[in-house]
C-alpha cells in the first residue's frame, strides 16, 4: 500500500467527516461520517473496501471519541501506515491565513484567538487538531481555511457601513466561509460546461447546517453572504442569518436578555430550528411539512427559501455574466423541495425547474435541474475533502 494518502478531517459543530484520499486523483480509500455528535444518538459510519460499517460512539459522544473510534478502525485494518499527513478544514483564518498552513503551536493559538469570530466552528476544528496530533504525533498537520477563497472579494464587498477604523484597527470586515466548497463546485461546473474556470461566473449556494451564497466572477469570489462571523446572510440550521441589529438592543434593553443569551439565541436557537420549533434538521422539517401539514414547518421552509432566493438575486449586482446557479451541501444536494422553492422565486431571472431532473439529482448524483429554455441551475456534490487533500499535499511537497 502506498503511503501518500492524506487523512482529511472536517469537524463541524455536530459532525465529523473524514476521508483517506489519494491527493493526486481524488481516489477515496476510506471515508465516513460521525454525526449527531454531542447527543446520545452519536454514530460513526465508515465506508471502506465496498463495506459500510456503523457503530455507536461511546460516551461522551464528542469529536475526540469519534476520532478514537476512527483510529481503532484504521489500526485494525492496517491503514495507519499509508497516511502521510492530516489535512484539517478550519473555518476562520481571518486576514492572517489565506493559504494552506502547516500547523504549529502559534497557528493553533491564532485559530483559538479567531474562535471569537466563529464560536461554533473553530473550537470544534481545534478539538479535531488536538485529537489528530495525539493519534498521529509524527505526521504533519495542515490547516485549509474556509475563509481563504473569499480573500479576492473587492473592498466594496467586504467593508461594512460602519466607522472605518473598526476595520483598520480591529479587522472588523466581511470574510466569508465555505470557500473550499464554493471553489470546488465552481470548478466542477465549469468543467461540465467545458469552460475554463477563469472565464466562468456562477452563483453558488452551499446549503448545509451552515448556509452561504457566493458570487463567483471569472473563477474568483467577488461576494458572499457570510460576513465577519458565520452568522450573517441567509437563514441556516440554528443561525438566524441577517436580522435588524436593532433587535439586539431591543432584546437587551426591553426584554432584559444578557449579551450571552442574545448570542446563544442567534447562533443556536434560530434559523430552521427557531422558526419550525421542531428541529434544525431539514429532513425532520420536510417530513413534518409533507406528512403532518405542520404550519411551523411550512413557514420555516418558506422563510429559508425566500431568503436564499433574495440573496441569489442580490448577487446579480456583482456579476456581468451568469453561467448558472449551483446548489450544494447536505440540503442543496438532497432537497428537491428546497431547490424548487428557491428557483420558483427566481422566475424573473428565467429559472424554470425541470421537475424530473430535480428529483433525479439527489443523494450524490450531480446534474442540471432546469429546463432547456431556462437559465441553468446545477446540483453538484461538493468534495471539500479532495480540495483539502490536494492543497495539503501541494504544501508539503513545496516545502520538502
Ligand atoms: P454541515 O454544515 O454540518 O456539514 P451538511 O452539509 O451535512 O451539514 O448538511 C446537513 C443538512 O442537510 C441537514 O439539515 C440535513 O437535514 C440536510 N439533509 C441531508 N439529507 C437530506 C435529504 N435527503 N433531504 C433534505 N435534507 C437533507
Image (cartoon, rainbow, N blue to C red):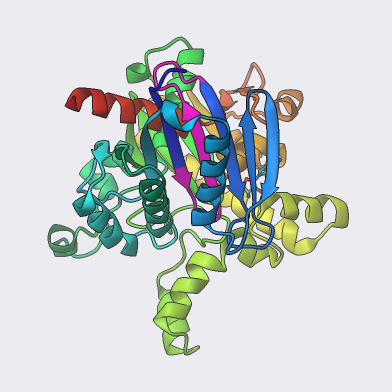
Where does the image place residue 373, in percent across and percent down from the top left?
63, 18
Q: Residue at x 35, y 36 (%)?
A: 318
Residue closest to the far top: 194
Give the vertical position of 153 relative to 1 (above or below).
below
- Residue 26 lies in the magenta stretch: yes
Residue 235 in sight from this viewpoint: no
Residue closest to the far right: 291
Where does the image place residue 306, in percent across and percent down from the top left?
59, 50
* The quarter of the displayed image where residue 388 is located: top left
Nearer to the camera, 16 or 153: 16
Give the vertical position of 161 relative to 68 (above or below).
below
- Residue 345 lies in the magenta stretch: no
Boundaries of the magenta span: 10-27
Across the whole image, how many numbered discs are drawn on residues?
0
* The quarter of the displayed image where residue 146 is located: top left
Where does the image place residue 95, in percent across and percent down from the top left?
21, 48
* The quarter of the displayed image where residue 334 is located: top right
237 left or right, relative to 112: right
150 left or right, relative to 252: left
Give the vertical position of 84 relative to 65 (above or below).
above
User: On the rendered image, what quadrant is the C terminus found in?
Assistant: top left
Nearer to the camera, 307 or 20: 20
Q: Residue at x 20, y 48 (%)?
A: 96
Residue 210 in sight from this viewpoint: yes
Q: Residue at x 60, y 29 (%)?
A: 351
Where does the image place residue 99, in percent across and percent down from the top left?
24, 36
Amino acid at each position: 500500500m502506498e503511503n501518500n494518502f492524506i487523512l482529511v478531517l472536517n469537524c463541524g459543530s455536530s459532525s465529523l467527516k473524514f476521508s483517506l484520499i489519494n491527493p493526486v486523483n481524488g481516489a477515496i480509500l476510506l471515508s465516513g461520517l460521525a454525526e449527531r455528535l454531542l447527543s446520545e444518538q452519536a454514530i460513526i459510519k465508515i465506508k471502506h473496501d465496498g463495506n459500510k460499517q456503523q457503530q455507536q460512539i461511546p460516551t461522551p459522544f464528542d469529536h475526540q471519541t469519534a476520532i478514537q473510534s476512527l483510529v481503532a478502525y484504521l489500526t485494525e485494518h492496517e491503514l495507519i501506515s499509508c497516511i502521510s499527513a492530516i489535512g484539517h478544514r478550519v473555518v476562520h483564518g481571518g486576514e492572517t491565513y489565506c493559504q494552506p498552513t502547516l500547523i504549529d503551536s502559534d497557528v493553533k493559538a491564532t485559530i483559538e484567538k479567531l474562535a471569537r469570530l466563529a464560536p461554533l466552528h473553530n473550537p470544534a476544528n481545534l478539538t479535531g487538531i488536538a485529537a489528530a496530533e495525539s493519534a498521529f504525533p509524527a505526521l504533519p498537520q495542515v490547516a485549509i481555511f474556509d475563509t481563504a477563497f473569499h480573500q479576492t472579494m473587492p473592498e466594496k464587498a467586504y467593508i461594512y457601513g460602519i466607522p472605518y477604523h473598526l476595520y483598520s484597527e480591529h479587522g472588523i470586515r466581511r470574510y466569508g466561509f465555505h470557500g473550499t466548497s464554493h471553489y470546488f463546485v465552481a470548478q466542477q461546473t465549469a468543467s461540465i460546461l467545458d469552460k475554463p474556470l477563469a472565464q466562468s461566473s456562477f452563483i453558488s449556494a452551499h446549503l448545509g447546517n451552515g448556509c452561504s451564497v457566493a458570487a463567483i466572477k471569472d473563477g474568483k469570489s467577488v461576494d458572499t453572504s457570510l460576513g465577519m462571523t458565520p452568522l450573517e446572510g441567509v437563514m441556516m440550521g440554528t443561525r438566524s442569518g441577517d436580522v435588524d441589529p436593532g433587535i439586539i438592543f431591543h432584546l437587551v434593553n426591553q426584554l432584559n436578555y444578557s449579551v450571552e443569551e442574545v448570542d446563544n439565541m442567534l447562533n443556536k436557537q434560530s434559523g430552521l430550528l427557531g422558526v419550525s420549533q421542531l428541529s434544525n434538521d431539514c429532513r425532520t422539517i420536510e417530513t413534518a411539512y409533507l406528512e403532518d401539514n405542520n404550519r411551523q414547518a411550512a413557514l420555516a421552509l418558506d422563510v429559508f427559501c425566500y431568503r436564499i432566493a433574495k440573496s441569489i438575486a442580490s448577487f446579480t449586482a456583482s456579476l456581468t455574466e451568469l453561467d448558472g446557479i449551483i446548489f450544494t451541501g447536505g440540503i442543496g444536494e438532497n432537497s428537491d423541495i428546497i431547490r424548487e422553492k428557491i428557483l420558483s422565486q427566481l422566475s424573473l431571472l428565467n429559472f424554470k425547474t425541470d421537475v424530473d431532473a430535480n428529483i433525479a439529482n439527489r443523494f450524490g448524483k450531480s446534474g442540471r435541474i432546469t429546463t432547456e429554455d431556462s437559465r441553468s441551475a446545477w446540483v453538484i456534490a461538493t468534495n471539500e475533502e479532495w480540495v483539502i487533500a490536494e492543497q495539503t499535499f501541494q504544501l508539503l511537497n513545496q516545502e520538502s
